[in-house]
Image (spheres, rainbow, N blue to C red):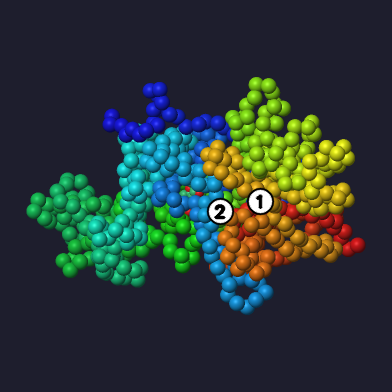
Amino acid sequence: MTELTWDGKYKDGKKTAPIRIALPFQTIETVNESAADRERRLGSFLNQRQETEDVDWRNRLIWGDKKYVLPSLLAEFAGKVNLIYIDPPFNVGSDFSFTATIADNPETEEDETATFVKQPSIIEQKAYRDTWGKGLDSYLQWFYETVVLLRELLAEDGSIYVHLDWHVGHYAKAVLDEVFGYENFRNEIVWKRSAIATNVKTQYRNSHDVLLFYSKSNQNNFNVQYGEYSESSKSHYNKKDEKGYYRTVPLMASGRTNGVSGQPWRGVDVANRGKNGMHWLKSPDELERLDNEKLIYWNKEKIPELKYYLEEAKGVYVSDLWDDIVVINSMAIESVSYATQKPEALLQRIIKASSNEGDLIFDCFCGSGTTAATAEKLNRRWITCDLGRFAIHTSRKRFLGIPNVRPFIMQNLGKYERQQWIQAEFDNPQGRLQQEKAYKDFICDLYHAKSLDNGYAYIHGVKAGRMIHVGGVEAPITSEDIKKAILEFWQMVGKEKAVATNGIDFLGWDFAFDINETAAQVAESNKVNVKFKKIPREVLEKKAVEQGDIKFYELASLDIKAKTQKERLAVTLEKFIIPPDDVPEDVRESITHWSQWVDYWAVDWDYKDDTFHNQWQSYRTKQNPKIELTANNHYEKNGCYTVLVKVIDILGNDTTKVLRIEIKNGE
Ligand SMILES: C[S@@+](CC[C@H](N)C(=O)[O-])C[C@H]1O[C@@H](n2cnc3c(N)ncnc32)[C@H](O)[C@@H]1O
């Protein structure tokens, strides 16, 4: 068979295979989970009730690179996915920048809504280089590795639709033929979208995308889809009775027969009609019934014809040319302002044709969540992932906006991805301690700090008069770590070994939820100034590190007021300040009220030290850009509760804060 090759496809005579490291997923949030289900999932009812897959199923929104997500899904889902739709990045570059919106200052009357384009983070740029770094060669290798794993996820009767355009559609077709088999190619669908008016002086306008539709086998599940009749087809329905418009079709066909279908009916001698005689297409009984039900039209020559109503007509078979689905424009109701958002009508057609209710739908380039949102509305199960933080945030809001959305969970590969990275980067034959030391030195180096080798366990470096603590990859930095680091800080100062006395910078991947308050208390009572800085995910990427300046930003600070009255609790956001991240200076200046940074916030009223259970939320949408700043809850039982508040800023970053409250009903 003819084969497409590219630089990097073969190594030592063998095809370069995708990486297959399976990492466990971490659930970071549950959304819309009922209190009863939550209890049950915590284990208390497990022994009393036999679980079924249905009861336990949760749709999944995963934040991560498909490179790790796909192999990690295989163990559970190989052969189980009924339909895959992917809309991979192919329009070089535009995929990772997004337009962030700043809402009005709630305290002024003026319309200050503004937008700015957030440039891709280093990790997103890296993903872009993965795909396009060496041009088409790297793109094809990346695409090949993706579809090999996707094929393994598909059920035997499953299908995949790959959405591309003229840039790479033809190359991708050759790769898909190789992976799925030419015989499993079902259609090349042409979707007529907007007509981009570039290069029109030397060529025709580009106005369509292609969707390559393959099945895993020749047993693919397919539900015939019907489209609307054209005006000219509708004009054939030109007769009308009390049931509506209809057209007529013959009740007889050419050729004489000897049975009942050749006998005269109601005086019409069918055998003597036409050149060589004719016969009835229905039995005499059926003709009687149709006539009694007024479904027969007697034409001018007193010949019966069958009425065919426009209302009951299913429509025309949908072809592989889709020109009836309009592209999303910024004014469309379903628009969530995501540059590459596709219309739900497109996904509706695909999902209805190639899956049934309850089936599992997957999309590893979630973007604004169109596939999952449409699957949800059509009662299918779904899993979707994206590498972009903003894509995940946009999708979560979109799903929450679906009336009666079923509970879903948000996951990532968190610490497992980092452990994997430490093992790969700092493997040391001398043992784990050496490995850990190498890792901490590396982080100090990126932070431009000098690492220390003085036997202390909690102080790892020094920079500009401050001591440095580097958090491990396994667990968040906790108040215990802070206390111990402060102790060591004073021991060092006391022994005059101190090389820095201005305070401590804590560098961590994650921080315990209560870090801000604890830190303030502990630091104040110990007279140490502390700062918390997040180790950015970019650190995991060798190339991003080589490329230079990795920025460690301070955690955002969030002030919350809690007010209890009998069994009621009101939580109010009082202030929110985010670190200067990559928000352009002029945009920062245009923000005149702290709440303009808040895009979304959610509350878990009874946090149980497991996962954040999203039980209340307020967020801005295009249609309703206002956000509530107070959330109320009514507790059924007296007691002490831990309340967790999660705020997501307009760039998609989250900040959490914990409150402890006591409910004393009527006291
Ligand atoms: C063309 S957009 C998808 C748009 C989507 N169909 C919609 O309707 O909104 C492609 C998406 O792929 C994501 N992406 C690119 N490379 C990725 C990777 N390696 N892993 C996961 N997601 C990736 C981008 O962040 C982007 O959101």
Residue at 26% over, 51% down: 283
Residue 553 is marked as 1
**Mark 1: which amino acid?**
Tyr
**Mark 2: which amino acid?**
Phe
Q: Report whether residue 58 is seen.
A: no
The crowd level at tag 1 (other Cα within 10 Å; few <14, some 14-19, many 20+) is some
Residue 594, image x, y percentages:
68, 65
Q: From the viewer's perspective, is 256 left or right of 379?
A: left
Which of the two residues, 348 or 460, is positioned nearer the viewer here?
A: 460
Instruction: Tell me if residue 426 comes above or below residue 252 in the rendering.
Output: above
Label 2: element kind: helix
Residue 390 is marked as 2
Label 1: element kind: strand
The crowd level at tag 2 (other Cα within 10 Å; few <14, some 14-19, many 20+) is many
Q: What is the spatial separation of the Cα atoms under label 2 and label 1, in whole angstroms?
A: 18 Å
Residue 96, image x, y percentages:
49, 51
For the N terminus, the quadrant is top left
Q: Quadrant of residue 197?
A: bottom left
Residue at 50% over, 46% down: 125
Residue 148 is marked as none
For the C terminus, the quadrant is bottom right
Instruction: Tell me if residue 345 comes above or below residue 470 in the rendering.
Output: below
Which of the two residues, 481 or 296, is positioned nearer the viewer here?
A: 481
CB under 8 Å between discs 2 and 1: no
Q: Report whether residue 558 is seen.
A: yes
